[in-house]
Image: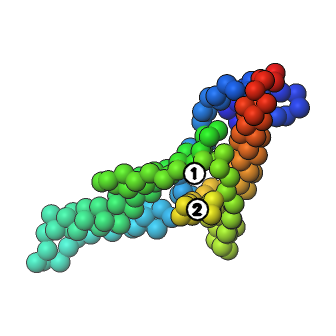
């Protein structure tokens, strides 16, 4: 947690009427297990290239082997890694932000203060790795899907805590505005 914590375990709250500072809680990417096949292809291509270099049948040459190995590495290792690297999820004290895209960057946000439901789906392999898919839905906008979230239970608890804190702050600020007297 990025906020200072009091003895009671709750984060410190700003005084009523004062806007709270947006702090970074977590930034993560999808679970890297989807790159397992890329790693196996990389090992296989290096092993095959090392074995067949200078051992090719007569009509083939070494440059052909190196070109094929380079194309395989580019298509099956580099491209999946770039796609994985280009998707990030940022959780702050105010919102959840999802960035994805290689050429054109897309950005989706969901505010904690508006409130949303949190759905968690975990397949058999995801349970083995401690990952899961989180779906955030506020009933108005399109659901925000966070696929292959590592340590999904911790992220779920963090999002639930942030919704609670944001709702408390919004309710408290609304009450102080209605009364006309700030409460400290």
Residue 140, label in figure: 2
Q: Is residue 98 above or below residue 122?
A: above
Is any atom of residue 160 visible in this view?
Answer: yes
What is the residue that sits farthest to the right in this orientation? 8
The image shows residue 33 at horizontal and vertical percentages of: 55, 62
Q: Nearer the viewer, residue 38 or 43?
A: 38
Q: Is residue 96 above or below residue 22?
A: below
Q: Earlier in the sequence, mark 2 or mark 1?
A: 1
Image quadrant where one finds the C terminus: top right
Classed neighbour count for the residue bearing mark 1: other residues with Cα under 10 Å, few (<14), some (14–19), many (≥20): many
| Position of residue 94 in the picture relative to residue 107 (left or right) | right
What residue would you read off at disc 1? 110
Classed neighbour count for the residue bearing mark 2: other residues with Cα under 10 Å, few (<14), some (14–19), many (≥20): few
| Position of residue 113 in the picture relative to residue 183 (left or right) | left
The image shows residue 67 at horizontal and vertical percentages of: 19, 64
The image shows residue 18 at horizontal and vertical percentages of: 67, 25
| Position of residue 80 in the picture relative to residue 127 (left or right) | left
Disc 2 vs disc 1: Cβ atoms closer than 8 Å?
no
């Amino acid at each position: 947690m990025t906020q200072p914590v009091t003895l009671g375990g709750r984060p410190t709250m700003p005084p009523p009427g004062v806007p709270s500072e947006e702090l970074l809680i977590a930034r993560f990417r999808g679970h890297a297990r989807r790159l397992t096949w890329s790693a196996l292809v990389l090992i296989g291509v290096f092993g095959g290239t090392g074995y067949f270099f200078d051992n090719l049948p007569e009509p083939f040459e070494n440059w052909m082997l190196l070109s094929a190995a380079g194309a395989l590495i580019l298509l099956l290792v580099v491209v999946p890694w770039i796609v994985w690297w280009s998707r990030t999820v940022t959780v702050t004290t105010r919102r959840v932000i999802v960035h994805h895209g290689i050429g054109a960057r897309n950005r989706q946000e969901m505010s904690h203060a508006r409130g949303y439901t949190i759905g968690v789906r975990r397949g058999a392999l995801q349970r083995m790795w401690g990952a899961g898919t989180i779906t955030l839905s506020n009933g108005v906008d399109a659901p925000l899907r966070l696929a292959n979230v590592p340590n999904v239970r911790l992220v779920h608890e963090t999002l639930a805590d942030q919704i609670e804190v944001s709702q408390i702050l919004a309710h408290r600020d609304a009450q102080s505005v209605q009364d006309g007297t700030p409460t400290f």
